[in-house]
Image: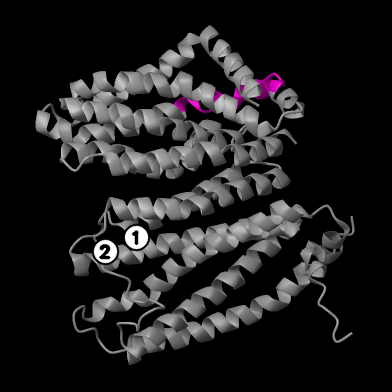
Amino acid sequence: MSKQSINWYKYASPQTFYPLAGKMIPWFWLLAAIFGIAGLTTGFLLAPMDEQQGEGYRIIFLHVPASWMSMFIYLVMAFWAALGLAFNTRLSGMMASALAPTGALFAFLSLWTGALWGKPMWGTWWVWDARLTSELILLFLYIGFIALQAAIDDPRRADKAGAILALVGVVNIPIIYFSVKWWNTLHQGASVSLTRAPSMAAMMLWGMLLCALACWMYSIAVALMRVRTIMLERERHTEWVRALLGDTE
Amino acid sequence: MLSVIGAVVGRDLRLALRRQADIAAAVFFFIIVVSLFPLGVGPEPDQLRRLAPGVLWVAALLATMLSLPRLFADDHRDGTLEQLALAPHPLGLIVIGKVVAHWLVAGLPLVLLAPVLGIQFDLAHDALVVLTLSLLIGTPALSGIGAIGAALTLGLRGGGVLLSLLVLPLYIPVLIFGAGAVDATVSGLGPQAHLSLLGALTLGGVFFAPWPTAAALRVALE
């Protein structure tokens, strides 16, 4: 027997996860602040001005991380949803509903900053290009998920219905993306890719990656805070929440 | 297996025919929405010809949406749905039967009406044929995907509006390829690629949609 494996199931219960989340939140906020300051300093003070786009390009330090996060959070949400459906754990559904508003916020931010960037660069706030359109549809999917959960009073049913919707959405995202892409492509090619050397200055890339990490840490911190609130709300009739809140009733 | 589907289709069709006003309402909704567009954008034939595929397809999506809430709601209200769920046959098969019946009642009339409405938009002969064909191929996908939304919103407050919020984003690929097929015909590219993709969407949608629909129905029935 070499080493004892970690008991992952221990933290699958809200009672044990609540204090753990409480302990992690300040660290993630701290990391978000550090990465945010480092990323914004790199992006706004150290990175060189872009030859073609001037100073206006600097909005990508928010735009690109926001777009990445909006897509990634949907995947994470679908992962928790699938876990919740498969193992019938309470916490998974709570995580999925805690992530949705943050994902929707990032999708909105990505569209908004994209519009602000598009006006000086393309001369228009909005074009019906593949990436913009699929980001808009992603926002619709988030809104549908949130609206569905809000319409169902029973939290267990809300979790399961939301999980089915999130999984259907995740299967559909590639189909929607490619259909929109074939429908119309105007957007410039991807400027960061894993297969070829990035076509931007190293300093710009660093700024963007640091900002992405900051957004990542922020998302985790906010999702944990939200999931703690959801836990308290849903488990308010249990012993541990009463003990925690000092309810002597 | 086919006898189960056939029995559900027969039952739903018989129920629908006893309540023809519901079918007629969705069909007239389709006609009215399509007829509103020339009034809104003006009667120039060139403009109408360019708008026609999109307008007809969007109107078809909306008309399908309109009849979706009733897919499971009546059976849910009188308890039939619970009996169907208890039946020894997979719930997915029963869902397929209901989807087929919904298409026959809500999708097929739109397909049959489309060429007539296309004439209002001054579409050429070949474009009319492709429009009808694209609706024929695409509308089953609308019924299939819509069934997921109908099952998820079963018995909820404001179910109808919520249903459109959930389902319309998922309809986008069908809309793109359906309207795209007609556009491609008008611009001389030929509709084969779009129609093939539309067929793929329909096959995929009708094949896979019964699973999440059955899962959502079980959640709603809990």
Furthest toward the top, the residue is B18
Q: Residue B215 sits in which quadrant?
A: top right
Q: Chain of mark 2?
A: A
Q: Which mark is residue B75?
A: none
Q: Does residue B26 show up?
A: yes
Q: Position of residue A63 (x, y in %)?
A: 37, 70
Amino acid type, residue under disc 2 in the picture? His
Share a chain, discs 1 and 2?
Answer: yes
Q: Is residue A98 something that shows in the picture? A: no
As helix, strand or loop, the secondary structure at mark 1 comes to: helix
Tag 2 secondary structure: loop
Q: Residue furthest bottom?
A: A46
Give neighbour class at mark 1: few <14, some 14-19, many 20+ (Cα, 10 Å).
many
Q: Position of residue B36 (x, y in %)?
A: 25, 25
Residue at 19% in and 28% down: B126
| Category of crowding for the residue at label 2, using alpha-carbon neighbours closer than 10 angstroms: few (below 14), some (14–19), many (at least 20) | few
Point out the image quarter for the C terminus of chain A.
bottom right
Residue to which mark 1 is pinned: A131
Identify which residue is drawn at 19% across, 43% down. B189
The overriding secondary structure of the stretch rendered in magenta is helix
In this view, B146 is above or below B43? below
The residue at 27%/77% (across/down) is A57
Horizontal and vertical percent for residue A114?
32, 65
Give the magenta-colored segment's residue range.
Answer: B66-80
Residue type at mark 1 is Arg
Q: Residue A37 at x, y = what percent? A: 46, 86
Q: Between residue B58 and residue A123, name the one nearer to us.
A: B58
Name which residue lies at 15% across and 27% down: B124
Q: Is residue B83 above or below residue A39?
A: above
Q: Which residue is label 2 attached to? A: A187
**Camera-nearest residue between A25 and A50:** A50
